[in-house]
Image (cartoon, rainbow, N blue to C red):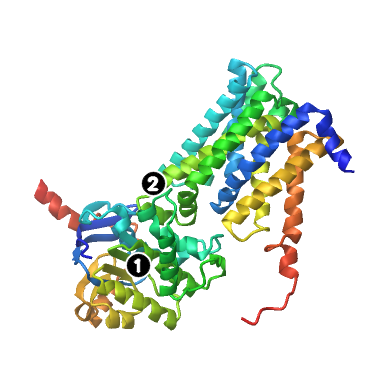
Amino acid sequence: MMMGLIEPFLEFSFLRRALAGGIALALSAPPLGVFLVQRRLSLIGDALGHAILPGVALGAALFGLSLAAMSGGGLLAGLVVMLAAGLAARGGALREDASLAGFYLVSLALGVAIVSWGPAQLDLLELLFGSVLAVDDAALLLMAGTATVTLVSLAMIWRPLVIETFDAGFLRAQGGRGALWHLWFLALVVLNLVAAFQALGTLMAVGLMMLPAVAARFVSPTLSGQVVASVGIAVLAVLGGLIVSVRADVPTGPAIVLCAGALWLALLLAGPEASVLARSLRRPHLAR
Amino acid sequence: MTPPPLVLDNVTVAYARHPAVHHLSGRFAPGSMTAVVGPNGAGKTTFLRTLVGELQPESGRIDRGGLAPGAIGYLPQAAALDRSFPLPCAEVAAMGMWAAAGPFRALSPAERARIEEALSAVGLRGFAARPIATLSAGQFQRLLFARLLLQDAPVLLLDEPFTAIDSRTTADLLRVLRRWHGEGRTIVAVLHDLELVRAEFPDTLLLAREVIAWGRTPEALTAENLFRARLMAEAWDETAEPCRQDEAPRRRAA
């Protein structure tokens, strides 16, 4: 049994690379997801994920199917949409999520249009859902670099980010430059989605960010606990997803997201904190 | 601790041209303790948020005497915060140290001890590690007072600090308020309980979109003034003319 799980990784070097990259992403993306959940911006990941697509497609159409061209284009498009939505929310009457909904629908349509017009090897399904075979050394370095930058950044901006998330008005009143931390944080979200799109696809990259974060709510009652738990859940999902992907011949992105989804459902039902089981267990109440 | 006075000069704050408060002029003296009283919709919260700098007045000027942003402590209405947020009490209280610690510096053991002290001072001894989601409304308000204590601000603006809170908690928090007053801090608090205002607050600003009365509490809270404040129309008048008080100075300028 154990051998059956390890064997594919021993046999295929591309799987080992995907595993290393996946674990790197599992370390950095879910903590961002935890903050997105607390900021009530759970859907922003989807929006930014869609926003990356036209950038990736345009990069490929103009400069060929290289990692640098596609990632650079995706990063640029993601940052532009992030800033545009932020500005639209600040200047207009719409909330940020409403502006993002507008931007991402346009981005997705634009992305699909550019893909159909770009080079023939550009495969829409592969862009949306990823391919484990696409993880070459350069992509692996991008993932590892992203994880490093994200974790170091997060450690640095942890305090202002937590305060800004809990009580933005307080930080503003203290002259704490709330917008800076917010934009820094969103830039990390974009960076993680871009780093993940080759292996997971622009759509599925969001899954690795959000599902473990949502599931972590059922593991720990504190923010730091949830961040740690989300990483653990994501690492399990990557491991399980890669094995399922090889054994059942399912694309990697959906396989990993399905595993994360299964963990989420399991924890929702039987997690130690606020789950269906924890709520229904009638333990005698304490004397004081 | 002598904060500078807060001086308002003809301040107007409007939403979509309809004034939330207009033509406010006056002065909060250093070390004064003022209750802001008025009917719902009188612009009390808008007024506080403008005073703290969160809203910009449409016209007029507020002179804060060069106070740094962090030197004004602001207590929002408790309902404005997400009380299910996964943080322990100590970390919420510690936010009050932002001005001292900034975004990056680690807290020293002495500062950590001050957090414990502040929690004890508001009656939350032993609550440091408790998630805020488990607090009652009164305990949560105590926690926000602990954050203000740590902020150590010379000017304190409190928005309905005693709403939905039992009498014992109110009494405890009033003790904190009296201590601040004794230390010479300027206090401005939005309140609904007139008994409490008469008993505890030397000064009162009676607000109904405009200043009805501003002065010593017994002179401000007369039956006649309170009646005038109640006459304030709550509904927006869509056919309202531009405010005439604005035209006089404009004509003078021209």
- In the rendered image, the vertical position of residue B31 relative to residue B246, given as above or below: below
Q: Are marks 1 and 2 in contact (CB under 8 Å)?
A: no
Q: Secondary structure at mark 1?
A: strand
- In the rendered image, the vertical position of residue A215 relative to residue B90, given as above or below: above
Q: Amino acid at mark 2?
A: Arg
Camera-nearest label, 1 or 2: 2
Badge 1 is on which residue?
B158
- Give the chain of mark 2: A
Q: Is residue B35 visible?
A: no
- In the rendered image, the vertical position of residue A178 relative to residue A282, given as above or below: above
Q: Residues within 10 Å of mark 1 (few under 14, many from 20)?
A: many
Q: Amino acid at mark 1?
A: Leu
Q: As rendered, which of A34 and B211 lies closer to the eye?
A: A34
- Give the chain of mark 1: B
Q: Residues within 10 Å of mark 2 (few under 14, many from 20)?
A: some
Residue A176 at x, y = what percent? 38, 49
Say which quarter of the image contains residue A190.
top right
Q: Is residue A30 visible?
A: yes
Question: Is A275 positioned to the left or the right of A57 in the image?
Answer: right
Which image quarter holds the N terminus of chain B?
Answer: bottom left
Residue A221 at x, y = what percent? 61, 61
Extreme residue toward the right, this view:
A1
Q: As rendered, which of B16 and B146 lies closer to the eye?
A: B146
What residue is rendered at 50% in x and 49% in y? A158
Badge 2 is on which residue?
A177
User: Which mark identifies residue A205?
Assistant: none
Residue A47 at x, y = what percent? 59, 39
